[in-house]
Amino acid sequence: MAALDATLSRAAGAHVQMDVKVDPALIGGLVARVGGTVYDGSIRTQLQRMKQQLVKQG
């Protein structure tokens, strides 16, 4: 958690207050909202993107 806090603080340019919630729907990874910016590193989103690419090509 400390490493994540440091990384998000660097990205935001200021100290961030973390509010941690577990969402099993993400499958894995994380989603971070810093101000108006969303950083989505969830497995769910990666699978959705892969599906979109396969449908596009198919």
Image (cartoon, helix red, strand yellow):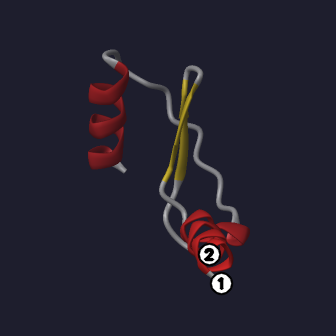
What's the residue at 37%, 51% (across, down)? 1
Could you tell me which residue is drawn at 73 percent across and 70 percent down? 25
Image position of 2 (left or right of 40):
left
* Residue position for label 2: 27
Look at label 2 and name its amino acid.
Ile
Q: Residues within 10 Å of mark 1 (few under 14, many from 20)?
A: few
Disc 1 marks a residue whose amino acid type is: Gly
How many numbered callouts?
2
Disc 2 element: loop
The residue that disc 1 covers is: 58
Spatial CA span between label 2 and label 1: 26 Å
Most foreground residue, 46 or 27: 46
**Vertical position of residue 4 compared to residue 27: above or below:** above
Above/below status of 19 relative to 12: below
Q: On screen, 33 above or below 50?
A: above
What is the x, y in percent for residue 17?
A: 49, 27
Which of 3/36 is in front? 36
Residue displayed at 64% across by 71% down: 56
Q: Position of residue 34 (x, y in %)?
A: 51, 27
Residue at position x 34%, y 15% in the image: 14
Q: Say whether disc 2 or disc 1 marks the residue closer to the N-terminus.
A: 2
Image quarter hosting the C terminus: bottom right
